[in-house]
Structures are given as structure tokens and as C-alpha cells.
Image (cartoon, rainbow, N blue to C red):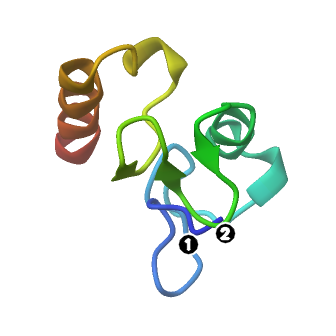
Amino acid sequence: MLCRFLSSDGICAGKYEGYACIRSNCSYWVEAHSCEHHDSTGDYCDKHARFGCVGKESCHTLSEYLQAASEAETA
């Protein structure tokens, strides 16, 4: 999976900002991989046809998904 929070130098820009990617130990990674809508070839949501997982609590509708994605980008 290509994480949307991973910078080109392998450093996390998300929850673990400033640290090297911990992949399978990352809560974002685990949550995305446990979702039935997650495409295992990349960070892609089959349900909403968008890149990036916003978490199951924020993906019931497309508008919820887009709002959560927007909030994640501004945080």
C-alpha cells in the first residue's frame, strides 16, 4: 500500500509525523487494511472511488468521506 502520509524520503507526515514509516504497526495502516472497501494494491477506497482511507466512522456517505478527507488535509 502506498500511504498518503508517507513522504518521498520515507518519513511519516501523518499521525507519527517526523518518524520513519512503521507500516504494519501503524494504526492508519491496520484500519485501512481491515476495511472491506480497501484496495490492497494501493491506498484506494473502492466504495467512494477515491484515494485515501478516512476510517470506517467517516465513510458512510460520500459527503462524510469528503469532509473527513478535507479535515485531514487541513490538520
Mark nearer the N terminus (2 vs 1): 1
Q: Amino acid at mark 2?
A: Ala
Q: Is residue 74 above or below residue 3?
A: above
Number of numbered discs overlaid on the protein picture: 2
Left/right of residue 47 with respect to residue 21 in the rendered view: left
Left/right of residue 14 with respect to residue 40 in the rendered view: left
How far apart are the two marked residues, 2 and 1, measured between alpha carbons? 4 Å
Report the residue at 23% width, 47% height from top.
73
Report the residue at 29% width, 17% height from top.
61
Q: Position of residue 53 (x, y in %)?
A: 47, 41
Q: Position of residue 42 (x, y in %)?
A: 59, 65
Quarter of the image where one finds residue 20 = bottom right
Q: Which mark is residue 61?
A: none
Classify the position of the N terminus by image quarter.
bottom right
Report the residue at 43% width, 33% height from top.
54
Instruction: Check disc 1 and report the residue beneath it.
Output: 11
Q: Which mark is residue 20?
A: 2
Q: Is residue 37 above or below residue 56?
A: below
Quarter of the image where one finds residue 21 = bottom right
Within 10 angstroms of label 1, few (less than 14), some, or many (20 or more) residues?
Answer: some
Q: Position of residue 70 (x, y in %)?
A: 18, 38
Q: Amino acid at mark 1?
A: Ile
Left/right of residue 68 with respect to residue 2 in the rendered view: left
Answer whether labels 2 and 1 touch (C-beta < 8 Å). Answer: yes
